[in-house]
């Protein structure tokens, strides 16, 4: 359990039991809260992007900050197999942020919200010593996909590149730029959320938004589902394609480690019966099978035919480690 | 138009037109966003409480901070004549905030959420240079009450004391304590939201959460409804009762000015046909009739039988003025 998880557990305990009322179906402990509504479910999440913690203004334009803030929250909704409906954004503006900057930030939110077909329909503005953007998104799903539910025999899927965001971040921190790292930087600035996969994900048995690194988030899904995930090293690296390979080489990282230890990928890790592939004979583009579900515990990665246990460690937003 | 409103208008323009889809009924510009759901409406708001902007830790315990953060957001929901369903809270924790502090904060949220019968069902934790609590609340209403809709002939109502929070804040800033200011301080630390009035408010023609001061918020409602509000000075002061009087005297403020210029009252200003009074023959406790709606523009206050225009100025969270 990370420091963040331990603290969350204490917070959950302090908040007390959630009454199982008519409308609240799922509370703390998954990617989104779920509210019952006739015919379908509302899923609901909140995510904060804080200056000097999640980004720096030397790296991102205000448009990028707005885009990234929206995408990071909406990704949680997609990870439930849900379609975003709308968002609210609470901005805390530090003295350095001008009105033109706020407008630019809103344009970035607009761009991201249009891709999601989920408008920003309200919010809040406040002054403060630190710039931050807190986004809450509501989405709709017939049957929200949780972290529990994966079954032995399922395949494990990733909806996008793993580790590229970490390499983009690293390239900013090390001040190494150039064409080898630009795709990774682009991924950091404007994470691409696969809204088009919400329907497909609705057929998954379990899913999680990879925001704290695959190693940690996969182990969370495995623990919650009571299964073991066996991932394939080659497939993991293949998700990132050539962009991962060249950026990793330029930055002196191993692509597999970047894929496993990355953070803020905003990619969905999903488990689904193999029968789900090729309903209609077609697998949505960009989905990569990265492993399989077995009976057991923990997460392993197969490298050159040998299983290696993966430690449940990753990006802890509270420790920044 | 305040700096905050001007900036909000720019943000709204930058965000672009909200598509009038099946689910989004009302976006930016009222106390909450509204989402359609069969049989009733969801209302949805977000509010931030930022250290050194909305409170100081010398004044509030962490329990108070949590309580206040929840109440300030939930008050927007009640101002729509809606009943809170649930909330999410995003905490940004500065290095000074310990895990025990976070737990205490969550206990305060729990206490406030129990009064609202609306649990905190999720959220987000992040590090950052500044402590803040951003709360998003969903509520349910058959017909949400907006800022527009007040009609000449309506009575104007307040659901609680006006100006007491301002005096509480002032007493902290001036470091004047004692029994004369303690009720005002209590109001600042733990604003009381009238969840029990959501049903009654559902019959109002228009309503607004008084969070930026009565003068400013009343003028907003008047402008949006295309009417004039004529308030009664004696009734305004009467809302605060003896607590307002003695605190104002101790702090050298005029009670009427405190009531008009206060901020963060988290009291609802509602317009309702006089017929709404005494349905069942009973008026809910704590409601005070503070004026009437006329044809015309602006806001006036009647002092000793003479109408005085009220300037649309108040607490601007961006200017801190």
Image (spheres, coloured by chain):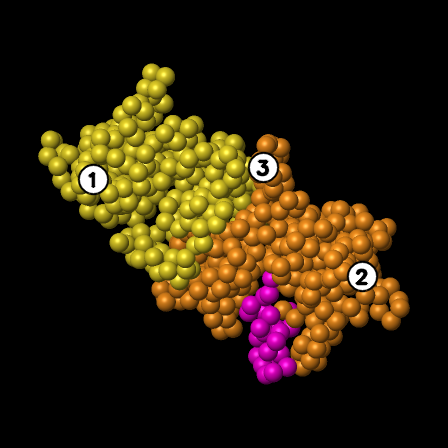
Chain colours: A orange, B yellow
Which disc is residue A291 wearing?
Answer: 2
Residue B33 horizontal/vertical position (percent): 44, 46
Residue A253, quarter of picture: bottom right
As measured in the structure, the alpha-carbon distance from the residue carrying label 3 to the one carrying label 2 is 36 Å
The residue at which mark 3 appears reads as A38
As measured in the structure, the alpha-carbon distance from the residue carrying label 2 to the one carrying label 1 is 67 Å
Which disc is residue B140 wearing?
Answer: none
Residue at 20 percent of width and 39 percent of height: B228
Residue at 58 percent of width and 81 percent of height: A177
Residue B100 visible (yes or no): no
Image height check: is B98 above or below B249? below
The crowd level at tag 2 (other Cα within 10 Å; few <14, some 14-19, many 20+) is many
Q: Secondary structure at mark 2?
A: strand
Q: Secondary structure at mark 1?
A: strand
Q: Which residues are magenta?
A: A166-193
Relative to the observer, which residue lies in front, A20 or B304? Answer: A20
Residue at 76 percent of width and 60 percent of height: A281
Relative to the observer, which residue lies in front, A287 or B160? Answer: A287
The residue at which mark 1 appears reads as B228
* Circle nearer the viewer, 3 or 2: 3
Residue B220 horizontal/vertical position (percent): 28, 45
Task: Give the chain letter at badge 3.
Answer: A
Residue at the far front: name it.
Answer: A280
Residue at the far right: name it.
Answer: A305
As measured in the structure, the alpha-carbon distance from the residue carrying label 3 to the one carrying label 1 is 41 Å
Tag 3 and tag 2 share a subunit = yes
On the rendered structure, is A92 left or right of B252?
A: right
């Amino acid at each position: 359990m990370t420091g963040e998880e331990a603290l969350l557990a204490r917070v959950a305990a302090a908040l007390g039991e959630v009454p199982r009322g008519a409308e609240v179906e799922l509370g703390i402990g998954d990617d989104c809260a779920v509210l019952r509504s006739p015919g379908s479910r509302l899923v609901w999440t909140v995510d904060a992007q804080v200056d000097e913690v999640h980004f720096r203004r030397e790296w991102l334009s205000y448009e990028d900050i707005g885009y990234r803030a929206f995408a990071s929250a909406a990704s949680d909704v997609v990870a439930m197999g849900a379609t975003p409906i709308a968002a609210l954004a609470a901005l805390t503006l530090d003295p350095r942020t001008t009105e033109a900057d706020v407008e630019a930030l809103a344009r970035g939110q607009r761009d991201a919200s249009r891709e999601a077909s989920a408008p920003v329909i309200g919010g809040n503005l406040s002054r403060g010593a630190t710039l931050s953007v807190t986004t809450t998104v509501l989405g709709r799903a017939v049957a929200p996909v949780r972290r529990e539910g994966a079954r032995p025999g399922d395949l494990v899927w990733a909806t996008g590149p793993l580790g590229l965001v970490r390499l983009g971040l690293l390239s900013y921190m090390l001040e190494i730029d150039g064409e080898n790292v630009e795709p990774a930087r682009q991924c950091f600035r404007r994470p691409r959320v696969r809204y088009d996969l919400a329907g497909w994900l609705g057929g998954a048995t379990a899913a999680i938004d990879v925001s704290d690194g695959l190693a940690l988030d996969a182990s969370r899904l495995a623990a919650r589902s009571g299964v073991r995930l066996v991932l394939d090293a080659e497939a993991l690296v293949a998700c990132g394609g050539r962009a991962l390979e060249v950026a990793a080489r330029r930055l002196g990282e191993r692509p597999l480690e970047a894929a496993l230890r990355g953070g803020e990928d905003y990619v969905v890790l999903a488990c689904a019966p193999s029968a789900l592939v090729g309903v209609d004979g077609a697998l949505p583009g960009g989905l990569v099978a990265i492993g399989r579900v077995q009976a057991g515990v923990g997460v392993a990665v197969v490298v050159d035919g040998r299983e290696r246990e993966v430690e449940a460690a990753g990006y802890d937003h509270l420790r920044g480690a």
